[in-house]
Amino acid sequence: MKKLIYLNLIFLTIISCSDDIDNNNLSEKCNISNYEANIIAVDSDDKELNTFIVKNGDERTFRFFEPSNINENTKILFLIHGWGGTAKQFWDDLPEFRVKAEENNYILVYPNGKPNNYDGLLYGQPKGTWQWWCQDVSAGECDTDDVSFLAELAQTMQSKYNICPKNTFASGISMGGVATFLANQKASKHFNGAASFIGSTFPAGGFPTADAFPLLMFDGTNDPFFITEGTGSIPSIIYNFWPEETVLSRNYSISFDTTRQTIFDYYAGNANCSSYEKIQITDSNSLVKWTNCDNGFEMWKYTVKDWGHTLPTLDSEAGINYADVVFEFFNKF
């Protein structure tokens, strides 16, 4: 069993951008006072792995990366893994994020999800298998308070490095993309931007919110989740993971009532964006940009024809690199 070295990091700070902020001119400074951060434990064998104690008593883990020159311009980016993935997998599979974070002066935070409560996952495996991001703790599939974890971890990192929530963003893949929306919709005091790749959102995750936030989306028209959205039906790909009789016999909330295009259009409208541009990246990939939005926000949506549930690459029909476009986008705010 690995030993954990507990560091009693007590930050007598609380995050607040000035209460009298004009929504059309976000404050450039953050006042930090009176917040007591939760305990962080550093793993003795894996220096990037940390254990975080949520105030509800839940013990969670995360990894993080520090750039070499943290200053008043440093930003925080949460990178949220997909269903069944881990923070370490995200870390190992996409090292370019750390290269770009060093170049662009970002702290990277990689939270770990917890196992879900589905019985019969992957044809008979018991609940507690694979990592998951919970949208609704009252639903049958999960009972993990991921909102508190993401919010308190963001608040602690902001306190530690004196970084304003308006400079804290989230990006994720698949269910990590779902969690990226979750952070911005249910923990909006601590996050100010989402970059969701092949991931959607649902009413259980807080959609729609009254407030807007900078939003980047990447989707493929042949994504087996994407093509069933708006029908209110269960996507057939679910049956690749659970036997049909298991799904139909339980009232699991796995239907998709809203399309990703509707989600994108809603937030562009909510931010009162007035300038529209469509850019053809490749023969298959088109980028829609909404600019001149409230608070200087922008809304970007990449849609790749005949693309599935896969991340983009420069040498593919998508013609873009995940890390490149994420930093390009968040550098604007």
Image (cartoon, rainbow, N blue to C red):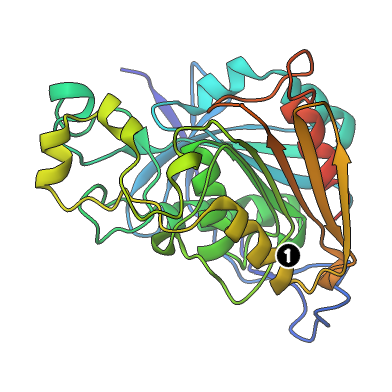
Note whether residue 9 is visible.
no
Q: Is residue 121 above or below residue 291?
A: above
Residue at the image point whose x is 14% and y is 30% from the top: 120
Is 2 or 136 nearer to us in this picture? 136
Of 162 and 198, nearer the camera is 198
Visible in this render: residue 270?
yes
What is the crowding at mark 1: few (fewer than 14 residues within 10 Å), some, or many (at least 20)? many
Residue 143, x across and y down, in percent: 26, 52
The residue pinned by badge 1 equals: 268
- Reply above or below: 235 against 320: below
Q: Is residue 213 left or right of residue 75?
A: left
* Residue 240 image-quadrant placement: top left
Q: Please tell me which residue lies in front, 116 or 252.
A: 252
Question: At x 74% / y 50%, what residue is drawn?
Answer: 161
Q: Residue sitting at 13 percent across and 48 percent down? A: 250
Q: Position of residue 157 (x, y in %)?
A: 64, 50
Percent across and percent down for residue 232 are 35, 55
Specify the quadrant of the image occupied by residue 271.
Answer: bottom right
- The residue drawn where x is 87% and y is 69% is 274
Q: Residue furthest bottom?
A: 20
Q: Quadrant of the C terminus?
A: bottom right
Q: Amino acid at mark 1?
A: Ala
